[in-house]
């Protein structure tokens, strides 16, 4: 995000403030991706965002405060794109909906490795405050998966822990790939991630049929 | 009266102290989190001199990593012992191994929390230890399952990650003691994808060849 012109520019103070805040969040996300949580400092964030240190403290109390805001924003961006993709299908089209959601999750992360890193890796590295957010974020995605999910293939019920294990398992896999520096290739995982997500509900045969039909 | 206290061998005392410091940091980080755990508190809990701690470890992180190594080591030993002790079919072996893992969580809640919860967020090195342990279990699962029901590697990684996540949640909920109750659900979660692949294997080739991804992928 470009800095605003200096001096008289006729922009409202609210606009300037919002723009600065957004730049700081973007700045933190980028710096974090490059140097990791521990070496990310307020001055590095300020430099990247072209915002002075004193202006930084007008928006955030501390590095962590800025981190929390950036983390929440990252999760919301992912959520929006997943929900927009799912929203093209009705509840009755559950497999297609899951497919669209997973596809959009993977492509959103692959397109923006810094976003992938803050949401899936640095979120866990930055201490408990953010870890709680990570956990809440993962849990919040469980609902999207279960909504409209069919009964287990054999007619029985899908065990209670399965929904959580599927979402947590995907988050764990993606986090490990991001950590390995493979964020940009995450899109290639689509068939496997989808098979993993659909199998408990549809059985392997049906899951693979849907994946190859896509 | 105890006129002469029998002397314990020096190595015994030293390793016992080491053990106490490891247990202390596991307990304290389980109670208040790694970040908030202070060396002073560890020393007090373990009943050792501050100097003893620094004679044995470089500092807090080094001690915490030693606790993780002890925890992951014990976990792995239990799981492998469980694999060895049954000659049953592979599904039963996987279930027995999973059961041994859950017993570890229930019986060693502080170490389990250090390894499966705190390690993730404590330091980059501790997160690396967690990651390595997870990878080790992915490999173990791959070795334990027959070649004809091979799944893509990614799925095994996700299965192990999914189990770790459930246990992580269980521990954070303060319910480590009941972890063993999750055995039926979790073993079904792990085994059902293999069962599905085995069923596909029995379908005539003409019906299945378009739906089964090439095994090289």
Image (spheres, coloured by chain):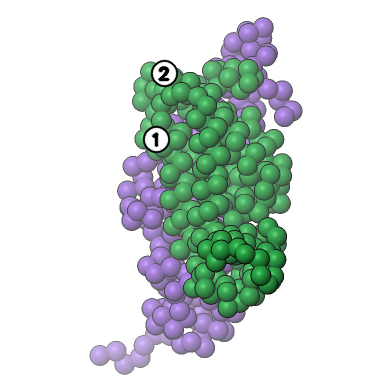
Chain colours: A green, B purple
Q: How busy is the neighbourhood of tag 2: few (under 14 within 10 Å), some, or many (20 plus)?
A: few
| Residue A23: quarter of image | bottom right
Q: Which chain carries label 2?
A: A
Residue A13 image position (x, y, % from top left): 55, 66
Please report, as a chain letter, where disc 1 is located: B
- Quarter of the image where the C terminus of chain B is located: top right
**A18 sits left or right of A165 in the view:** right
The answer to whether marks 2 and 1 mark residues whose Cβ atoms lie closer than 8 Å is: no
- Above or below — where is A40 with respect to B44? above
Task: Provide residue A109's location: percent of width, then percent of height.
Answer: 63, 44
Tell me where residue A153 appears, x and y as whole percent: 44, 19
Residue B147 location, quadrant: top right
**Residue drawn at (44%, 20%), measured in percent from left and top?**
A92
Give B205 or B96, whichever is nearer the viewer.
B205
Between A75 and A9, the residue placed more toward the observer is A9
Residue B84 visible within the image: no
Picture layout, residue B23 above or below residue B98: below
Residue B185 tag number: 1
Q: Work out whether residue A38 or residue A28 is closer to the camera in this orientation and state it.
A: A28
- Looking at the image, the residue that sits furthest to the right is B216
* Residue A180: x %, y % from top left: 69, 51
Instruction: Work out whether A191 lies above or below A115.
Output: above
Q: Is mark 1 on a helix, strand or loop?
A: helix
* Residue at which label 2 appears: A154
Is residue A153 visible in the rendered image? The answer is yes
State the SS at label 2.
loop
Kindly report the distance in space between the C-alpha atoms of the residues bearing marks 2 and 1.
15 Å
Front-most of residues A205 and B62 = A205
């Amino acid at each position: 995000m470009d800095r605003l012109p200096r001096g008289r520019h006729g922009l409202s103070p609210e606009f300037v403030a919002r723009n600065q805040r957004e730049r700081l969040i973007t700045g933190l996300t980028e710096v974090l991706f490059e140097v990791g949580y521990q070496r990310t400092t307020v001055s590095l964030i300020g430099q990247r965002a072209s915002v002075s240190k004193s202006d930084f403290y007008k928006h955030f109390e501390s590095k962590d405060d800025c981190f929390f805001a950036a983390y929440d924003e990252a999760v919301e961006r992912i959520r929006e794109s997943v929900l927009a993709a799912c929203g093209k299908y009705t509840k009755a089209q559950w497999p297609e909906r899951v497919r669209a959601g997973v596809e959009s999750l993977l492509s959103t992360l692959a397109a923006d490795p810094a976003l992938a890193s803050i949401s899936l890796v640095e979120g866990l590295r930055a201490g408990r405050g953010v870890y709680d957010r990570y956990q809440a974020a993962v849990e919040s995605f469980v609902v999207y998966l279960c909504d409209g999910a069919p009964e287990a293939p054999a007619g029985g019920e899908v065990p209670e822990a399965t929904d959580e294990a599927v979402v947590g398992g995907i988050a764990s896999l993606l986090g490990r790939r991001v950590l390995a520096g493979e964020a940009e290739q995450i899109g290639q995982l689509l068939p496997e991630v989808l098979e993993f997500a659909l199998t408990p509900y549809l059985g392997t045969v049906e899951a693979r049929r849907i994946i190859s039909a896509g | 009266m105890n006129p002469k206290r029998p002397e314990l061998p020096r190595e015994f005392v030293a390793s016992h102290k080491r053990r106490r410091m490891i247990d202390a940091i596991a307990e304290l980080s389980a109670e208040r989190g790694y970040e908030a755990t202070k060396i002073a508190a560890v020393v007090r809990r373990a009943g050792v001199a501050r100097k003893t701690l620094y004679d044995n470890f470089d500092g807090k992180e080094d001690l915490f990593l030693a606790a993780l190594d002890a925890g992951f080591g014990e976990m792995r030993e239990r799981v492998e012992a469980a694999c060895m002790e049954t000659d049953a079919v592979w599904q039963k072996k996987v279930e027995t191994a999973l059961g041994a893992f859950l017993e570890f969580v229930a019986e060693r809640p502080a170490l389990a929390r250090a390894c499966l919860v705190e390690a993730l967020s404590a330091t980059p090195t501790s997160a690396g230890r967690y990651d390595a342990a997870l990878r080790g279990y992915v490999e173990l699962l791959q070795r334990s399952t027959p070649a004809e029901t091979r799944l893509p590697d990614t799925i095994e990684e996700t299965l192990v990650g999914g189990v770790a996540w459930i246990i992580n949640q269980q521990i954070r909920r303060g319910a480590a003691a009941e972890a063993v109750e999750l055995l039926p659900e979790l073993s079904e979660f792990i085994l059902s994808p293999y069962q599905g692949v085995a069923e596909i294997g029995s379908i005539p080739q003409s019906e299945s060849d378009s739906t089964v991804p090439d095994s090289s992928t």
